[in-house]
Amino acid sequence: MRRALITGIRGQDGAYLAKFLLEKGYEVYGADRRSGDSSNWRLRELGIENDVKIVYLDLLELTNVMRVIDKVKPDEIYNLAAQSFVKASFEQPILTSEVNAIGVLRLLEAVRTLKPDVKFYQASTSEMFGKVQQIPQNEKTPFYPRSPYGVAKLFGHWITVNYRESYNIFACSGILFNHESPLRGLEFVTRKITYSLARIKYGLQDKLILGNLEAKRDWGYAPEYVEGMWLMLQQKEPDDYVLATGETHTVKEFVEEAAAVAGFHLEWTGEGVNTKGIDKNTGKVIVEVSPEFYRPAEVDVLVGDPKKAKEKMGWSPKIKFKELVRIMMESDLRRVSNLVRSKNA
Ligand code: NDP
Ligand code: GDR
């Protein structure tokens, strides 16, 4: 039985990857940093809460990381743990770098010392492209990160490449574009949109307040992306791959599509921070913009080219923008409706 260690087990990708690997027959160890709210809700929603073996691991502490690697002796490590919210990285740049940059190095040092034959996956990101030099972006596109998050992840990417080249470790860096799902954290724009619109629909909230509506992202479906992570570690040679859909849409388009699924009849007025989204069914303003949600430096447009992943690993995403929005919006409508029903019961 192959044994996998997943850091970031309580995050979106950790949960989907754990489910995927359990279905493949792996023994799955999930590394939890024991934060105040070590909530199991994602593992519970996927029905695997009791199937994952939890170990305590914080990427900030080298001795802790070493003991876990020594104890678990995994065949594969998926390093998904990170301070993953780009906006917060402007407020916590040092913590973000400790976790997202030096944290990767701590893991790799532990691997080099204790388990050099492990297969290692690093969760890299399209945020490393930042101020885009080329459209679409592929594995050869130059990097120009635009946030402390992106800069720290770039270190994580290069140190992974460096340990592969220096010590012959089977280390892969997956450069993943945004991927979403009903298990996405509420701070990220897609889930914020679908959850807020569902709450507005059921009378629990008046408005959805967003930042930059013009940013463009290449949004895919998380369960398909975790399969791509696993495929990288099953190849003959370690390498780096872009996973993306190849489509890009604005935040505004995401709101429009989600609003339509939720049964609103959205009409826009104004521009920039004065933009308002009015529901024509009721005449009420349901979307507004606030500078509070803008970032000091923005990544304007991301669109990935997943050609290499398709040619070398046979990976290609099936769920594209419209279907993704529908899945997320319908899931949040169900969630909020159940909540309202249980409150009224
Ligand atoms: P989440 O934010 O949902 O999950 C990240 C996890 O990392 C959380 O469970 C968090 O723990 C854990 N974590 C944070 N700090 C530490 C630490 N010091 N030590 C150990 N664990 C820690 O992220 P996603 O699942 O969305 O993303 C997974 C990875 O992929 C991240 O590295 C992210 O940066 C990267 N990525 C994500 C993309 C996406 O679109 N989702 C795209 C490209 C890359 P806790 O639960 O306690 O907060
Ligand atoms: P991102 O995701 O920064 O791409 O990082 P996020 O959903 O936070 O932002 C996407 C875009 O939407 C704009 N935006 C808003 N964002 C948030 N969160 N809240 C708002 O109210 C809002 N209004 C507009 C943002 O400015 C941005 O342009 C995600 C994370 O999962 C990273 O960990 C991962 O590496 C990248 O995706 C790929």
Image (spheres, helix red, strand yellow):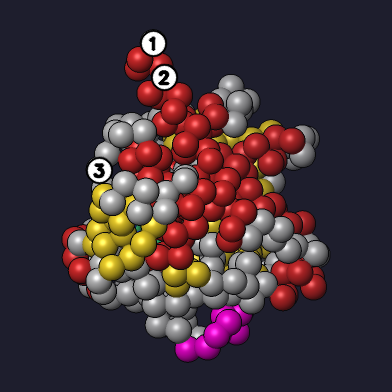
Residue 207: x percent and y percent? 26, 48
- Residue sitting at x 31%, y 59%: 277
Residue that badge 1 annotates = 345
Residue placed at 75% from the left, 62% from the top? 315
Of residues 102 and 157, the one drawn nearer to the viewer in this rendering: 157
Pick the quarter of the image with the C terminus: top left
Amino acid under label 1? Ala
Q: Nearer the viewer, residue 19 or 61?
A: 19
- Of helix, strand and loop, which one carries label 2? helix
Quarter of the figure with residue 113? bottom right
Q: Is residue 214 magenta?
A: no
In terms of sequence position, does the residue under pointer 3 or pointer 1 come before the other? 3
312 up-or-down from 222: above or below: below
Ligand 1 lies under 8 Å from the Cβ of mark 2: no
Label 1: which secondary element: loop
Quarter of the image for residue 52 reads top right
The magenta segment is: 133-141
